[in-house]
Amino acid sequence: MGNFQNKYLEIKNINKDIVDWVEDVAEENNCRIERNEWKSKYNSYVVYDYEPFCSEGFEINLLISSFDISYLNFIKYLYKEKLSTIEYLDNCAKMPAVRNYII
């Protein structure tokens, strides 16, 4: 018989702006969001399973499951690539503009 036990991937401290993207990618890749939590950065006892009214000061953690570890590895790869792309674009935006002067 095959191994039908779920495998898990936990992603901690996700940027609020890409939570929906991670959830969509998980769904598109035969995975399920097992837990969505907003955990206070100041008090570890304050944890919500929904976005609080004021989500500033909270870290967002997701627990994703799948029957196949390869789907989770792919989501992990896509997430790292997304973070890398965002970092690259942020760095490009911070670079001073180069002006060409014609004399």
Image (cartoon, rainbow, N blue to C red):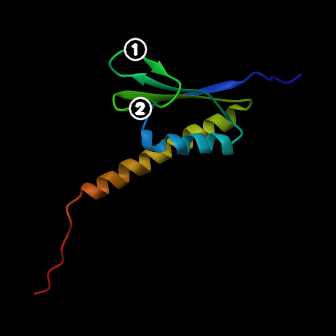
Give the amino acid type for the residue marked by disc 1 in the picture: Ser
Q: Residue at x 32, y 18 (%)?
A: 42
Does residue 71 appear anywhere in the picture? yes
Does residue 11 appear anywhere in the picture? no
Q: Is residue 40 left or right of residue 76?
A: left
The residue that label 1 is drawn on is 44
| Image-quadrant location for residue 10 | top right
Q: Residue furthest front?
A: 53
The residue that label 2 is drawn on is 53
Give residue 51's position: percent from left, percent from top.
47, 31
Q: Secondary structure at mark 1?
A: loop
Q: Residue furthest top?
A: 45
Q: Is residue 83 above or below residue 63?
A: below
Q: Is residue 77 left or right of residue 56?
A: right
Q: Mark 1 against mark 2, which lies toward the viewer?
A: 2
Relative depth, front residue between 65 and 87: 65
Which sits earlier in the primary sequence, circle 1 or circle 2?
A: 1
The quarter of the picture where the N terminus appears is top right
Q: Is residue 32 left or right of residue 46?
A: right
Relative depth, front residue between 11 and 53: 53
Q: Residue at x 32, y 52 (%)?
A: 90
Judge the density around disc 2: few (<14), some (14-19), many (≥20) Cα neighbours within 10 Å: few
Judge the density around disc 1: few (<14), some (14-19), many (≥20) Cα neighbours within 10 Å: few
Give the amino acid type for the residue marked by disc 2 in the picture: Phe
